[in-house]
Amino acid sequence: MSTLSPEALVTLDGIAGHQHLRTSRIASALGNGLGSSTLDYAVAHHLLEGAEHAAHARNTDLLAWYRKTTTRDLTHLSAGPHILLSPRPENLLRSEISETAYYLIRPDTSPALPEAQALVRAALASATEHGFRTLLTQHAPVICLLNRRRLDETLHSWALTRLPGTVFTDYTAHPEVLARDLIHEAAHNWLNDALAAHDVSLPADVTFFSPWRGTPRPVYGFLHACWAFSLTVLYARQARRSATGTVVSFLDAHLRQQEGQFASALDSLAEALSYVSADVLRDRVSRAVSKATSAR
């Protein structure tokens, strides 16, 4: 099996069309003038969820804002081709759309502080240097920084199916660590889009043991872990070569940990992939895992 570069791994026919169709449907429902970029795709879902929240709360002014706003109205939140959010903890939301807290763009959303913008720019530059620009531009155009942590503290990050293109993540002072976590969550967003674009439906009653969770997981969750952690391995393997200081040992520890996790998961991968009806998608996940688990 020949290997593919990270850029080639995530370049897949059908995803752009799926994003454009979804964005146009949301724009039609809201009655606004959204464009067709990947940023529009991510922002559209913030506007749709926000409009639903406002409608349920009978807040007519907020509903009107969500219905008329477009990406062009949010340039004050931009960090290059991305929108960067850094909300206060008390402004995070919890509802039936997510088991975890999340945040929606609002009229009073403020730009992130300059130091946060600089960190994100450095993380994006590192990801770009090692072949992950397309993934982050197309599947993490909205970045939501949560809690600043030390390198020895647990970092939490996640993505929501209801907010494709948005990544929520804790962060440290090290851009390589942020890049790793952005890549991980963008990979989840990519796989969700790829499954939807190729009309893949996975059984909920078939499970495989996930060493990452330490418990049996449905096919969907198992394959998500295999795919996302494969990409973080490919990034960390390259980034550690130019990294300095304590982040080197951090990335090395990540690579050692993933080596053990994949050793426990590989026996189940082929069977799990057999439930993916799209040949091209099975091939991409298989190639990513193969490349991540091959000799350096």
Image: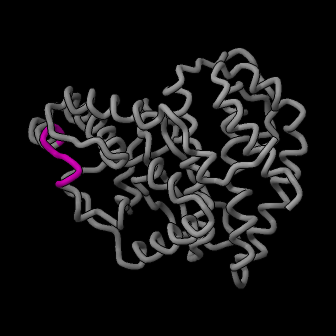
Which residue is depicted at the point 65% across and 19% down? 277
Q: Position of residue 75 (x, y in %)?
A: 23, 61
Q: Is residue 190 left or right of residue 162?
A: right
In the figure, 280 relative to 39: above or below?
A: above
Which residue is depicted at the point 90% across and 33% down? 267
Snapshot quadrant of residue 115:
bottom left
In the figure, 252 relative to 186: above or below?
A: below
In the figure, 236 relative to 159: above or below?
A: below
Q: Position of residue 65 (x, y in %)?
A: 13, 43
Snapshot quadrant of residue 237:
bottom right
Q: Is residue 176 left or right of residue 265?
A: left
Which residue is depicted at the point 62% across and 61% down? 180
Q: Position of residue 36 (x, y in %)?
A: 29, 41
* 278 or 27, nearer to the observer: 278
Magenta stretch: residue 69 in it?
yes
* 84 or 146, nearer to the observer: 84
In the figure, 172 relative to 226: above or below?
A: below
Q: Is residue 266 left or right of residue 287?
A: right
* 280 or 274, nearer to the observer: 280
Residue range (magenta):
66-72
Which residue is depicted at the point 54% across and 65% down? 128
Helix, strand or loop for the magenta stretch, by majority: helix
Magenta stretch: residue 282 in it?
no
Q: Give the position of the N terminus as an image quadrant.
A: top right
Work out whether residue 101 can be spotted: yes
Q: Is residue 45 left or right of residue 153?
A: left
Q: Position of residue 146 (x, y in %)?
A: 47, 60
Work out whether residue 87 can be spotted: no
Q: Residue furthest bottom?
A: 245
Q: Give the position of the C terminus as an image quadrant.
A: bottom right
